[in-house]
Amino acid sequence: MAAACDWAGNTVARSAGDGKWPAAAFLSAADEVAEIIRRLAVEDVAALPLLSRATCRDLVLAAGQLTFRRASPIVGSPGRLVRQDFDLTVDFPPESPYRHLATALDALLAEACASLDPPAVDPTIGFHLNDLILQRYPAGSEGITPHRDHVNYKGLVAVVPLSGSGAFYICADRAGNGRREVPAPVGSLVLMRAPGYRCDRPRPFHCVSNIGAERYSFGLRYDVTRETCEMAAV
């Protein structure tokens, strides 16, 4: 078991689940997750099944109890602008199933990373999921244009699509050249490299588009600028 901090900032022992989200609820085991983490050394993104359709439906129903706000339509600096067309929330009550899912997924990733020799993620960075966001893309949304996640996010970036339809793409650059769709159906765990992943390849450009039906997507990251396990906007 690895030490981590819980959402209150207390040091706790990681296990396969927190008692409120059993490890058995996951469709893939730690060794399978370890394999896709290993693949990130040569691939920009990798995915595998994580949650059942029924579990995803329950999470979407729970999202009805959350308060969303509109994302800024344009973020970034000149020459690096990103267009966004979705609602978001980063506010999750203490007993939210999203918090319990994050705790269990953090433990699953810790177990997977610990099994890799040599390590894929630099063990000195203290990787743990401390930044959560739930995004809601309405049908017909333009999604989000090609971008890279902030350099403050380290190790691994995780995304779990929970409902709807849409396409997740990896791109060669901010213009969207070389766009390649990554198969990631509802319930998938999508992982991308971030600084602290041990390889020389840069963080990948990616985007979401073709939203045909309302799409919920849960993002989980490690923000090294945060001294506690509180959640902040992405």
Image: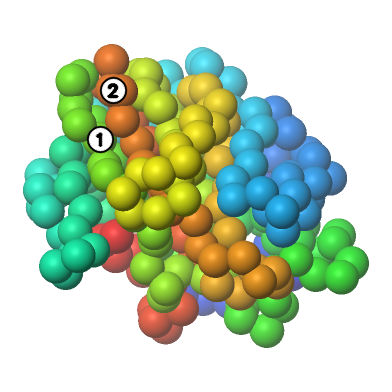
In which quadrant of the rendered view does residue 218 lie?
top left
Crowding around mark 1 (Cα neighbors within 10 Å: few <14, some 14 to 19, many 20+) is many
Identify the residue position indicated by label 1 in the image. 143
Rendered position, 130 above or below 72: below
What amino acid does circle 2 point to? Ile
Residue 98 relative to residue 117: left or right:
left
Q: Residue at x 46, y 50 (%)?
A: 172
Q: Secondary structure at mark 2?
A: strand
Q: Residue pushed farthest right?
A: 117
Q: Which residue is mark 2?
A: 211
Looking at this view, is 145 or 30 the one in front?
A: 145
Residue 11, horizontal then vertical, whole percent: 58, 77
Mark 1 and mark 2 residues within 8 Å of each other at the beta carbon: yes
The answer to whether residue 181 is left or right of residue 218 is right
Q: Quadrant of the C terminus?
A: bottom left
Q: Residue at x 28, y 15 (%)?
A: 212
Q: Is residue 68 left or right of residue 25?
A: left
Question: Observer-nearest residue: 12 or 41?
Answer: 41
